[in-house]
Amino acid sequence: MRFVLATALVLALVAATCNAAITKDQVTSLPGWDKALPSKHYSGYLPVGNGKGFLHYWFIESEKNPSTAPVVVWLNGGPGSSSLVGLLTENGQFQTNDNSLDEHGNITLLYNPYSWSTIANMLYVEQPKGVGFSYCAEGVDCVNTDESVGEEFADFLDGFFNGFSEYKKNDFYITGESYAGIYIPEILKAVDARGNLNLKGAAIGDGCIGNEVSTCGFQNQADRIAVEFYYGHGMYPQTLYPKIKDACGNFTKETQQCRAALSEMNRKIGNFDIYNVYDQCGSDQVTVSDIYRQLREAREFTTTGSQAFAVHPQLQKGVAGALNDYACGAEKVMGMWLSKPDVQKALHVDHQGRQQYRRTAADLRPLYKTLAQKYRILIYSGSVDACVPYWGSEEWTRELGFPEKEAWRPWTSPSSDEPNQEIQAGYVTTYNAGQHNFTFLTVSGAGHLVPQHKPAQALTMFKRFLNNQPF
């Protein structure tokens, strides 16, 4: 009987998706915002995996020409981080932070003038199943792998574009950060195989490329990248660098001498925010050895659903803020707002997820190389992100072996302080991947959450990427 009811529910949801998704999912108002919404919003659930799971999405139409603007997915990483983190603290139409709170604890949503929805139709999806407000069907073991993410997200997109069929002809992109560097190529592979969308490319910030390589492998090569990053940022003395190199060699194996040298490095570095080494909010002061010890154990993560959203393991303390750049408290206030019953009612959500995640993708560089020859791909990094440092991302993008189309150079962007003044925003290298550009770009002064730390530069980057313009 339970299976029959579950099947009926799936069929009903699919039918609703095809015929009335816009009507039933439209968000007409949001607590904390007392004016008309700047553009149309939709929030609801779509089934994936033959009804095994239901993914929560929040779709925000572009503020300019939504009928012709591209449709862009945004995904946070983790695994287990809600993409509402991106919406409400990074590039969404509204933001939360300490400035949202008054002395009585009331929360006001803050309009984000650098929202990516100013130029694109933005689709934020809490995935995989069991993350955030997304959930699994009753009686289903809520287990995800890197490969299942791709197929089930392709299911989600089929349902979404059935319900919002007027957007199926629009250019389509997938963007995200951190562990989304693993999600996105798996999704691109699945979408490419189905061949039913106007897929143009992907942009990935501070991204992982596999669970056994580079920084996110949390092995010896992650230590090698960290040594170079911290040395380049002047976080330990010059005299220690050759000592580490002598003790660790090429970091191919772990030795007692190497561990001792790295321990000395960590002591001299001290405490800092691994997501932004210049952060001063003070809510996530940890050592790199602490972080790597917590994550190195890992081939499986579990989120319990004890909050209305699940964040990346390194963000559990609610890190936000940066040196003189942006307000603290972004995720703290986000959690407060999303836990309000009237907010959940406005967003049509009534579940809190619980999932198990198995990190199964070892090395995705060969897949990246294949995809880059079919789609336009941008890899970008915040220059002060110590979680997935630019040093490692520059290395692996170069070592894919594509010929340089344009060598490393500065790129510029309007400043958030002086919109009519161009400032140096970072550095960019462009490779020729056949029919498409493959690009590596840094954003100076940004940490792991580039759109939060440097919103004006992030919007410029995003706009030029969508328009296939030089950076």
Image (tube, rainbow, N blue to C red):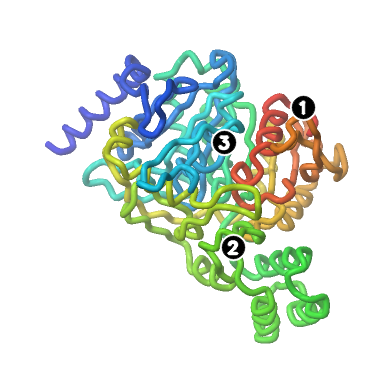
The total number of labels drawn is: 3
SS state under label 2: loop
Q: Which residue is mark 1?
A: 469
Residue 26: x and y, percent? 36, 22
Amino acid at dot 1: Gln
Residue 214 visible in rendering: no
> Quadrant of residue 259 in the image?
bottom right
SS state under label 3: helix
Q: Report the disc number at residue 273.
A: 2
The residues bearing labels 3 and 2 have C-alpha atoms spaced at a distance of: 32 Å
Q: Quadrant of the N terminus?
A: top left
The residues bearing labels 3 and 1 have C-alpha atoms spaced at a distance of: 22 Å
Nearer the observer, 192 or 450: 450
The residues bearing labels 2 and 1 have C-alpha atoms spaced at a distance of: 34 Å
Question: Does residue 324 appear left or right of residue 184 in this picture?
Answer: right
Classed neighbour count for the residue bearing mark 1: other residues with Cα under 10 Å, few (<14), some (14–19), many (≥20): few
Amino acid at dot 3: Leu
Q: Which residue is mark 3?
A: 188
